[in-house]
Image: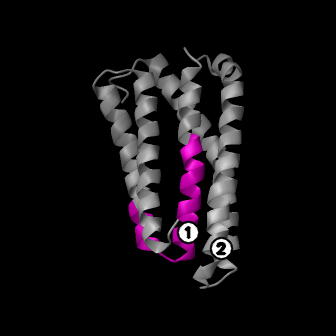
Protein backbone atom coordinates (compact mmCIF):
# COMPACT_ATOMS: atom_id res chain seq x y z
CA UNK A 1 0.00 0.00 0.00
CA UNK A 2 2.89 2.33 0.67
CA UNK A 3 3.82 2.33 -3.01
CA UNK A 4 0.38 3.47 -4.10
CA UNK A 5 -0.35 6.09 -1.43
CA UNK A 6 1.36 9.36 -0.75
CA UNK A 7 2.86 9.73 2.69
CA UNK A 8 0.01 11.99 3.82
CA UNK A 9 -2.65 9.59 2.49
CA UNK A 10 -0.96 6.68 4.22
CA UNK A 11 -0.89 8.71 7.45
CA UNK A 12 -4.61 9.44 7.14
CA UNK A 13 -5.37 5.76 6.47
CA UNK A 14 -3.25 4.60 9.42
CA UNK A 15 -4.76 7.23 11.75
CA UNK A 16 -8.27 6.09 10.95
CA UNK A 17 -7.46 2.40 11.28
CA UNK A 18 -5.69 3.06 14.58
CA UNK A 19 -8.72 4.95 15.85
CA UNK A 20 -10.93 1.99 14.89
CA UNK A 21 -8.60 -0.45 16.67
CA UNK A 22 -8.47 1.65 19.83
CA UNK A 23 -12.25 1.76 20.12
CA UNK A 24 -12.49 -1.94 19.28
CA UNK A 25 -10.96 -2.72 22.67
CA UNK A 26 -14.28 -1.68 24.24
CA UNK A 27 -16.32 -4.00 22.04
CA UNK A 28 -13.86 -6.86 22.65
CA UNK A 29 -14.26 -6.47 26.41
CA UNK A 30 -18.03 -6.39 26.15
CA UNK A 31 -17.86 -9.43 23.86
CA UNK A 32 -16.05 -11.35 26.59
CA UNK A 33 -18.73 -10.32 29.06
CA UNK A 34 -21.50 -11.49 26.72
CA UNK A 35 -19.75 -14.82 26.18
CA UNK A 36 -19.58 -15.26 29.95
CA UNK A 37 -23.29 -14.47 30.30
CA UNK A 38 -24.23 -16.95 27.57
CA UNK A 39 -21.98 -19.60 29.14
CA UNK A 40 -23.81 -19.35 32.47
CA UNK A 41 -26.78 -21.10 30.89
CA UNK A 42 -24.60 -24.12 30.03
CA UNK A 43 -25.93 -26.20 27.18
CA UNK A 44 -29.47 -24.96 27.62
CA UNK A 45 -30.18 -23.63 24.16
CA UNK A 46 -33.64 -22.53 25.26
CA UNK A 47 -31.82 -19.48 26.60
CA UNK A 48 -31.67 -18.14 23.05
CA UNK A 49 -34.27 -15.61 24.11
CA UNK A 50 -31.36 -13.97 25.94
CA UNK A 51 -29.51 -13.77 22.63
CA UNK A 52 -32.52 -12.27 20.89
CA UNK A 53 -32.75 -9.64 23.61
CA UNK A 54 -29.07 -8.86 23.44
CA UNK A 55 -29.07 -8.71 19.66
CA UNK A 56 -32.10 -6.51 19.44
CA UNK A 57 -31.53 -4.21 22.41
CA UNK A 58 -27.88 -4.26 23.37
CA UNK A 59 -26.18 -4.35 19.99
CA UNK A 60 -28.69 -2.07 18.33
CA UNK A 61 -28.86 0.68 20.93
CA UNK A 62 -25.24 0.63 22.07
CA UNK A 63 -24.00 0.36 18.51
CA UNK A 64 -26.21 3.20 17.34
CA UNK A 65 -25.29 5.30 20.39
CA UNK A 66 -21.59 4.90 19.70
CA UNK A 67 -22.18 5.60 16.01
CA UNK A 68 -23.96 8.86 16.90
CA UNK A 69 -21.14 9.68 19.32
CA UNK A 70 -18.61 9.22 16.50
CA UNK A 71 -20.68 11.31 14.11
CA UNK A 72 -20.97 14.13 16.66
CA UNK A 73 -17.24 14.01 17.35
CA UNK A 74 -16.26 13.67 13.70
CA UNK A 75 -15.53 17.40 13.21
CA UNK A 76 -13.28 17.41 16.28
CA UNK A 77 -11.54 14.17 15.27
CA UNK A 78 -11.09 15.57 11.78
CA UNK A 79 -9.29 18.59 13.17
CA UNK A 80 -7.26 16.56 15.66
CA UNK A 81 -6.12 13.97 13.09
CA UNK A 82 -5.70 16.60 10.32
CA UNK A 83 -8.06 14.72 8.01
CA UNK A 84 -9.27 16.16 4.72
CA UNK A 85 -12.92 15.38 5.46
CA UNK A 86 -15.12 14.36 8.40
CA UNK A 87 -16.74 11.74 6.17
CA UNK A 88 -13.73 9.50 6.72
CA UNK A 89 -14.49 9.38 10.44
CA UNK A 90 -18.13 8.60 9.66
CA UNK A 91 -17.03 5.69 7.45
CA UNK A 92 -14.97 4.28 10.31
CA UNK A 93 -18.00 4.73 12.58
CA UNK A 94 -20.12 2.69 10.17
CA UNK A 95 -17.55 -0.09 10.29
CA UNK A 96 -17.56 0.09 14.09
CA UNK A 97 -21.36 -0.10 14.16
CA UNK A 98 -21.24 -3.40 12.31
CA UNK A 99 -18.56 -4.62 14.71
CA UNK A 100 -21.12 -4.41 17.52
CA UNK A 101 -23.55 -6.61 15.64
CA UNK A 102 -20.82 -9.08 14.71
CA UNK A 103 -19.72 -9.29 18.34
CA UNK A 104 -23.07 -10.80 19.35
CA UNK A 105 -22.86 -13.42 16.60
CA UNK A 106 -19.30 -14.38 17.57
CA UNK A 107 -20.42 -14.71 21.21
CA UNK A 108 -23.16 -17.10 20.12
CA UNK A 109 -20.64 -19.19 18.19
CA UNK A 110 -18.34 -19.28 21.23
CA UNK A 111 -21.24 -20.32 23.43
CA UNK A 112 -22.12 -23.20 21.13
CA UNK A 113 -18.41 -24.05 20.80
CA UNK A 114 -18.26 -23.63 17.02
CA UNK A 115 -14.59 -22.71 17.08
CA UNK A 116 -13.95 -23.83 13.52
CA UNK A 117 -16.65 -21.46 12.32
CA UNK A 118 -15.17 -18.64 14.40
CA UNK A 119 -11.75 -19.23 12.85
CA UNK A 120 -13.16 -19.19 9.33
CA UNK A 121 -15.16 -16.03 9.97
CA UNK A 122 -12.26 -14.17 11.55
CA UNK A 123 -10.03 -15.10 8.62
CA UNK A 124 -12.69 -13.90 6.17
CA UNK A 125 -13.05 -10.67 8.18
CA UNK A 126 -9.32 -9.93 8.07
CA UNK A 127 -8.75 -10.98 4.46
CA UNK A 128 -11.81 -9.13 3.14
CA UNK A 129 -10.90 -5.89 4.89
CA UNK A 130 -7.28 -5.99 3.75
CA UNK A 131 -8.00 -7.14 0.21
CA UNK A 132 -10.91 -4.72 -0.36
CA UNK A 133 -8.82 -1.83 0.95
CA UNK A 134 -5.73 -2.85 -1.05
CA UNK A 135 -7.75 -3.22 -4.26
CA UNK A 136 -9.28 0.24 -3.76
CA UNK A 137 -5.82 1.71 -3.26
CA UNK A 138 -4.30 -0.25 -6.14
CA UNK A 139 -7.05 1.05 -8.44
CA UNK A 140 -6.05 4.54 -7.29
CA UNK A 141 -9.44 5.34 -5.76
CA UNK A 142 -7.85 7.17 -2.83
CA UNK A 143 -8.12 6.97 0.92
CA UNK A 144 -11.87 7.56 1.14
CA UNK A 145 -12.59 4.58 -1.09
CA UNK A 146 -10.03 2.47 0.78
CA UNK A 147 -11.82 3.21 4.08
CA UNK A 148 -15.15 2.47 2.36
CA UNK A 149 -13.75 -0.84 1.11
CA UNK A 150 -12.54 -1.74 4.61
CA UNK A 151 -16.02 -0.94 5.95
CA UNK A 152 -17.58 -3.13 3.26
CA UNK A 153 -15.29 -5.95 4.37
CA UNK A 154 -16.66 -5.57 7.91
CA UNK A 155 -20.24 -5.56 6.62
CA UNK A 156 -19.58 -8.72 4.58
CA UNK A 157 -18.12 -10.40 7.65
CA UNK A 158 -21.14 -9.55 9.83
CA UNK A 159 -23.48 -10.85 7.12
CA UNK A 160 -21.57 -14.16 7.03
CA UNK A 161 -21.61 -14.33 10.84
CA UNK A 162 -25.37 -13.90 10.71
CA UNK A 163 -25.65 -16.75 8.21
CA UNK A 164 -23.56 -19.02 10.42
CA UNK A 165 -25.59 -18.26 13.55
CA UNK A 166 -28.90 -18.47 11.75
CA UNK A 167 -28.24 -22.19 11.30
CA UNK A 168 -27.81 -22.56 15.07
CA UNK A 169 -30.91 -20.67 16.15
CA UNK A 170 -33.84 -19.01 14.49
CA UNK A 171 -32.74 -15.45 15.11
Quarter in which the N terminus is drawn: top left
Residue at image position (41%, 43%) is: 153
The circle on residue 54 is none
Within 10 Å of disc 2 (Cα), the crowding (few <14, some 14-19, many 20+) is: many
The circle on residue 108 is 1
Is residue 141 among the parts visible in the rendering? yes
Residue at image position (55%, 22%) is: 87
Residue 136 vs residue 18, the one in the foreground:
136
Question: As drawn, which residue projects farthest toward the bottom?
Answer: 43
Q: Which residue is mark 2?
A: 38
Kindly indicate whether the residue at mark 1 contacts the one at mark 2 (C-beta within 8 angstroms): yes
Residue at image position (43%, 23%) is: 143
Is residue 29 among the parts visible in the rendering? no
Q: Which of marks 1 and 2 precedes in the sequence?
A: 2
Residue at image position (53%, 40%) is: 95
Per the image, label 2 sits on a secondary structure element best described as helix
Question: Magenta stretch?
Answer: 96-120
Instruction: Judge whether residue 113 is colored magenta.
Output: yes
Q: Is residue 132 left or right of residue 154?
A: left
Q: How many marks?
A: 2
Amino acid sequence: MIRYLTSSDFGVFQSLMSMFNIFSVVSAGIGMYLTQQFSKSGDDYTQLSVLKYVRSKFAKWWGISIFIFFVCLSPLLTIYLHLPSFRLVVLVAISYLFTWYGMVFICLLKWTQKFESISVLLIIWAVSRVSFGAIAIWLDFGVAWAITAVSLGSILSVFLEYLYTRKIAAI
